[in-house]
Image: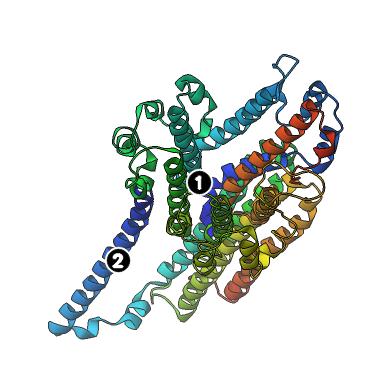
C-alpha cells in the first residue's frame, strides 16, 4: 500500500505544480491588467495594436525559427520513438536493424523539409533600404512568412510523431513476422506524406510575398 | 497520447519482452517434444529453444525437477534483465509482479516451519523472483504477530498483512487463510495501481486481473467445500474485483456443492462452458482423456487473455503477460517431461499450447 501511494503522490505532485503555475500566471495577468486600467492607461492594454506595432522582421524570423524548430522537434521525437523500439526488437532478431533504418530516415526527412523551407523563407529576408520604413509589401511578407512557417513546423511536428509511432510498430511487427514489414511500411509512407502537405501549403502561402526592401 | 512518450522509458524493454515472446515454444515444437522417448531426447529437442544454454551443462540422466529448476532459471534470468534495465514507472510495475511470488514464498516458509522442515531446503525451494532480504528470518516466527513485527514490516508485503493480523496462531487453516487474504490484498492493490497507470495499460491489465480474481473466487469456493471454513470467512477471502464481484460472490459464498457453483457460473458468458463436463473439479494436472480439468480450462483462458495483450503496443501489460505465458510454458515442458519419465504417454497431450 505504501508503495502504491508513492507512485500516486508523484502524479499528485505534478498536478499540484500545474495548478500553482497556472494560478500564478493568471493572477499576474489580472494584476498587470488592473494596474494599467486603474492608473488610467487602460488603452495600453491593446493586443491588436501591439501586434500591429511589431516589426515585420519579427514576424518573418519567428516564422523561420518555428518552421525549422518544430520540424526538428518532430523529427527527433519520431526518431526516439522508432529508434528505441528498433533497438529493443533487434536484440533478438538482428536482421531487422538495417531494414528498419528506413523508419529513421523517414523521420529525418521531416527535419529536411523544415531546413529546406527555412532556407526558402530566409531568402526573402534582407535589410530594408527605403528611407520611408516598411512598405505594405514588407508587412505582407512578414505575416506570410510567420504563418507559412508555423504551418510547415506544426505539420512536420505531427508528421514526425506519426512516422515515429508507425516506425516503432513496424520494428516490433517485423521482428515477429517478416511479412508484415512491407505492409506497415506502406502506412508509414502515407504518414510521411502529411509533412509534404505542410511543405506545399507553406510554399503557396509565401509564394506571392516579395522579398523585403524591393520597393 | 500515451504513444508519444511511452517509448522514452519502456520502448527498449518492450522490444526486448516481445523478443522473449517470440522465443516461446510453438505448437510444432511441442509436437516434437511429445514424440520424445527419453529425457535425453527431450533435452536434445529443447536445445533448439531458449532453454538451450541453461540445459547444456546438465549431466545426462536429467530429472524433471532439475529440468524445472533450470527452466525457472531461464525465466528468472530474463526477468532480471528487464528489471536491471527498467526506469521508474516500469520498474515499479515489475516489482509489483514479484510481490505475488513473495507471498507464495512467505507461505511456503511458514508452512515448512510448521512441519519442521529444514530451513535450508525450504529456502532453495523458494521462487527466486520472490526473494527479499529478511526472508530467511521467517523460519523463526511462531505467531502471526511475530511474523509481522520481526520480518514482514520491512518488506513490501507489510501493507497486505494488515487484514491478517487478527489471526491468533499459525495452524494449517490459518496459513491458508493468510495466503488467500494476502493474495486478495495484493490483487486489489495491483489493480488500483494499474488503473493509475492510465490507458491502455489500465484496461488491458484490468481484464487480466479481473480474470485472476474470478479464478481465485471459484477456486476458494470449490476448495472450501468440506472444510471448517465458515461461509462468512469464505466471503471475506473473495477479491473485491472481477466480473463476479459483488453479485455472484454473495451467492457463491452460500453454496455447498459443485452443482450450485455451476448453476451460478452458467449466467456468465465467459465461464458458461468452462464448468460443463468438469466432474468434481480442481484435480490438478489433467484428469486424463479428452476432459480437461477445471484448472486446465482456467489456464487455457489465461493464456488466451495474455496472448491478446500482445495485440496492442505501448502498454505495460506485455511484461505481465509474458511472465504468465512463460510460466505456463515451463509447466507444459515439465508436464511433458513427467509423462516421459513416468512412461505415461497417453496423458502427454494434456498441456496448454501457447502459440
Q: Chain of mark 2?
A: A
Residue B335, located in which quarter of the rendered image?
top right
Furthest residue to the top? B59
Q: Residues within 10 Å of mark 2 (few under 14, many from 20)?
A: few
Element marked by disc 1: helix
Q: Position of residue B232 (x, y in %)?
A: 43, 59
Element marked by disc 2: helix
Q: Position of residue A56 (x, y in %)?
A: 42, 72
Q: Residues within 10 Å of mark 1 (few under 14, many from 20)?
A: some
Residue A98, located in which quarter of the rendered image?
top right
Residue in front for this viewpoint, A132 or B241: B241
Q: Which residue is mark 2?
A: A19
Give the answer, above or below, for where B288 lies relative to B334.
below
Give the answer, above or below, for where B352 lies relative to B247.
above
Q: Chain of mark 1?
A: B
Rendered image: mark on residue B62: none
Marks 2,1: beta carbons within 8 A: no
Q: Position of residue B308 (x, y in %)?
A: 67, 56
Furthest residue to the left? A39
Q: Which residue is mark 1?
A: B9
Residue drawn where x is 75% and y is 15% of the image = B60
Give the answer, above or below, for where B70 lies relative to A173.
above
Give the answer, above or below, for where B305 lies relative to B328.
below
Amino acid at each position: 500500500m505504501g508503495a502504491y501511494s508513492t507512485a500516486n503522490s508523484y502524479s499528485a505532485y505534478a498536478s499540484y505544480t500545474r495548478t500553482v503555475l497556472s494560478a500564478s500566471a493568471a493572477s499576474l495577468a489580472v494584476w498587470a491588467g488592473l494596474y494599467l486600467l486603474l492608473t488610467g492607461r487602460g488603452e495600453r492594454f491593446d493586443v491588436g495594436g501591439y501586434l500591429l506595432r511589431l516589426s515585420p522582421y519579427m514576424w518573418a524570423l519567428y516564422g523561420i525559427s518555428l518552421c525549422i524548430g518544430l520540424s526538428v522537434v518532430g523529427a527527433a521525437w519520431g526518431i526516439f520513438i522508432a529508434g528505441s523500439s528498433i533497438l529493443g526488437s533487434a536484440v533478438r532478431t538482428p536482421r531487422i536493424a538495417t531494414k528498419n533504418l528506413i523508419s529513421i530516415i523517414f523521420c529525418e526527412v521531416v527535419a529536411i523539409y523544415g531546413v529546406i523551407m527555412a532556407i526558402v523563407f530566409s531568402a526573402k529576408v534582407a535589410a530594408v533600404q527605403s528611407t520611408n520604413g516598411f512598405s505594405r509589401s514588407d508587412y505582407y511578407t512578414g505575416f506570410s512568412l510567420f504563418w507559412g512557417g508555423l504551418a510547415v513546423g506544426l505539420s512536420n511536428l505531427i508528421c514526425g510523431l506519426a512516422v515515429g509511432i508507425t516506425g516503432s510498430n513496424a520494428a516490433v511487427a517485423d521482428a515477429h513476422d517478416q511479412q508484415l514489414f512491407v505492409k506497415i511500411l506502406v502506412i508509414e509512407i502515407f504518414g510521411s506524406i502529411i509533412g509534404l502537405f505542410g511543405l506545399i501549403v507553406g510554399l503557396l502561402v509565401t509564394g506571392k510575398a516579395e522579398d523585403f526592401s524591393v520597393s | 497520447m500515451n504513444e508519444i512518450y511511452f517509448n522514452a522509458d519502456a520502448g527498449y524493454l518492450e522490444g526486448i519482452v516481445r523478443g522473449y515472446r517470440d522465443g516461446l515454444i510453438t505448437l510444432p515444437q511441442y509436437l516434437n517434444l511429445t514424440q520424445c522417448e527419453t529425457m535425453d531426447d527431450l533435452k536434445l529437442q529443447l536445445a533448439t529453444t531458449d532453454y538451450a544454454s541453461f540445459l547444456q551443462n546438465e549431466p545426462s540422466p536429467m530429472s524433471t525437477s532439475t529440468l524445472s529448476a533450470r527452466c525457472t532459471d531461464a525465466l528468472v534470468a530474463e526477468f532480471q534483465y528487464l528489471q536491471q534495465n527498467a526506469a521508474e514507472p516500469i520498474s515499479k510495475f515489475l516489482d509489483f509482479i514479484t510481490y505475488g511470488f513473495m507471498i507464495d514464498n512467505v507461505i511456503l516458509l511458514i508452512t515448512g516451519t510448521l512441519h519442521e522442515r529444514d530451513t535450508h531446503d525450504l529456502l532453495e525451494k523458494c521462487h527466486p523472483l520472490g526473494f527479499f532480504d529478511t526472508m530467511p528470518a521467517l523460519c523463526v516466527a511462531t505467531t502471526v504477530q511475530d511474523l509481522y513485527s520481526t520480518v514482514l514490516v520491512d518488506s513490501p508485503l507489510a501493507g497486505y498483512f494488515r487484514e491478517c493480523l487478527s489471526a491468533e496462531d499459525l495452524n494449517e487453516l490459518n496459513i491458508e487463510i493468510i495466503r488467500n487474504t494476502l493474495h486478495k490484498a495484493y490483487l486489489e492493490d495491483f489493480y488500483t495501481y494499474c488503473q493509475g497507470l492510465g490507458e491502455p495499460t489500465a484496461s488491458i491489465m484490468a481484464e487480466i486481473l479481473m480474470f485472476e480474481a474470478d479464478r481465485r473466487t471459484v477456486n476458494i469456493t470449490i476448495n472450501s467445500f468440506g472444510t471448517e471454513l465458515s461461509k462468512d470467512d469464505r466471503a471475506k477471502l473473495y477479491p473485491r474485483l472481477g466480473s463476479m464481484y459483488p453479485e455472484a460472490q454473495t451467492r457463491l459464498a452460500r453454496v455447498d456443492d459443485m452443482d450450485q457453483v455451476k448453476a451460478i457460473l452458467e449466467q456468465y458468458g465467459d465461464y458458461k462452458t468452462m464448468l460443463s463436463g468438469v466432474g468434481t473439479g480442481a484435480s490438478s494436472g489433467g484428469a486424463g482423456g479428452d476432459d480437461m480439468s477445471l484448472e486446465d480450462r482456467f489456464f487455457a483462458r489465461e493464456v488466451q487473455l495474455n496472448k491478446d495483450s500482445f495485440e496492442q503496443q505501448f502498454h505495460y501489460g506485455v511484461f505481465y503477460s509474458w511472465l504468465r505465458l512463460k510460466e505456463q510454458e515451463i509447466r507444459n515442458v515439465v508436464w511433458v517431461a513427467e509423462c516421459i519419465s513416468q512412461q505415461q504417454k497417453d496423458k502427454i497431450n494434456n498441456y496448454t499450447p501457447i502459440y
